[in-house]
Amino acid sequence: MSMISTGGLFCKDDDPMDPPGMTQEEAIKNIGKIFRSPVILSSIPNNTLRQNLVIRQPGYDTRAALIDPNVVFPYEILTKLKNNNLIKSVTDNFYSFVGACSQSNLIKKAAPQWVDLMISQKVDGVLLVLA
């Protein structure tokens, strides 16, 4: 089992946005530029500590996700399900991208690459999480 979230999460040391280090407020102000940017899938190890996660997504109010990232990226829940033998396995990495993006680029360019990524990992299922 893997997961792809539209929540705009990434690891602290792997900022996908240009310029890196943009704040949430700056992202909101630059939403037009973000819509025109390439859709980037961030890879997040399934054992990432909460304090190493960053959320930047101009398309929704991120306050609840800042308190508990599992509301838009239920990585701890998937890991718990696996540890309780309710699902067979999880991928080493889960994934997130900024859902406030060009839907055309997402469908035509990014999604086919992500399907290939999941196939290469022999994933049986992918939890798609909308934020």
Image (tube, rainbow, N blue to C red):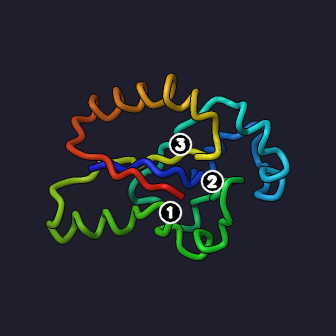
Circle 2 sits on which residue?
12
Name which residue type carries label 3. Answer: Ser
Mark 1, mark 3: which one is toward the viewer? 1
Residue at 57% across, 28% down: 104
Between discs 2 and 3, the one toward the N terminus: 2
Between discs 1 and 3, the one toward the N terminus: 3
Image coordinates of residue 99 in percent, x first then y, are 58, 46
Image coordinates of residue 117 in percent, x first then y, are 36, 31
| In this picture, residue 89 sits left or right of residue 55 | left
Image coordinates of residue 29 in percent, x first then y, are 85, 50
Q: Quadrant of the C terminus?
A: bottom right
Cα–Cα span, label 1 and label 2: 17 Å
Mark 2, mark 3: which one is toward the viewer? 3
Circle 1 sits on which residue?
72
Cα–Cα span, label 1 and label 3: 14 Å
Helix, strand or loop at mark 2: loop
Residue sitting at the far front: 104
Circle 3 sits on which residue?
42
The residue lying toward the viewer, choosing from 108 and 43, is 108
Between discs 1 and 2, the one toward the N terminus: 2
Q: How many marks?
A: 3
Image coordinates of residue 7 in percent, x first then y, are 56, 55
Name which residue type carries label 2. Answer: Lys
